[in-house]
């Protein structure tokens, strides 16, 4: 297995430490899923924001 070194923020480092031995599996799964483009994220956020504004 290859070894890599990354610099990450402290908060992310703590989260990665909690994942432990599952990190390779989680990285693999995240790379297999297609990334959403920015316009899809904007659409989702706008939808949620409008729904929130319409609440009584």
Image (spheres, rainbow, N blue to C red):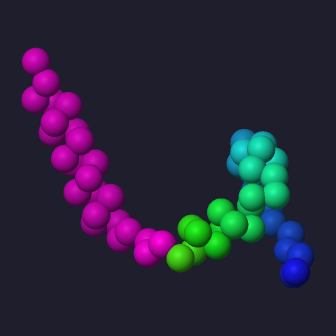
Please state the horizontal and vertical placement of residue 5, each as a whole percent of the image.
86, 69
Q: Looking at this rendering, what residue extends furthest in the bottom direction?
A: 2
Q: Is residue 39 left or right of residue 4?
A: left
- Across and down, in percent, residue 52 comes to 20, 31
The answer to whether residue 13 shows anywhere in this view is no
- The structure residue drawn at horizontal position 10% and vertical position 29%, both measured from the top left corner, is 54
Left or right side of 28 for 38: left
Does the magenta stretch mainly form a helix, a strand or a loop? helix
Quadrant occupied by the N terminus? bottom right
Quarter of the image for residue 21 reads bottom right
Q: Quadrant of residue 56?
A: top left
Q: Residue at x 44, y 72 (%)?
A: 35
Residue drawn at point x = 87 percent, y = 81 percent: 2
Residue stretch in magenta: 33-56
Above or below, comparing residue 10 to residue 54 in the picture = below
Q: Is residue 53 above or below residue 24?
A: above
Query: Which residue occupies 81% across, 66% down?
Result: 6
Q: Return the x and y of residue 53 as percentages of the image width and height.
A: 15, 30
Residue 1 visible in image: yes
What is the total number of numbered labels drawn onto the structure image?
A: 0
**How far from the left and from the top, in percent, is residue 18?**
77, 44
Frontmost residue, 10 versus 21: 21
């Amino acid at each position: 297995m290859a070894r890599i070194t990354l610099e990450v923020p402290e908060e992310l480092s703590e989260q990665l430490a909690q994942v432990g031995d599952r990190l390779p599996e989680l990285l693999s799964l995240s790379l297999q899923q297609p990334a959403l483009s920015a316009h899809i994220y904007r659409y989702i956020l706008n939808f949620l924001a409008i729904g929130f504004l319409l609440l009584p």
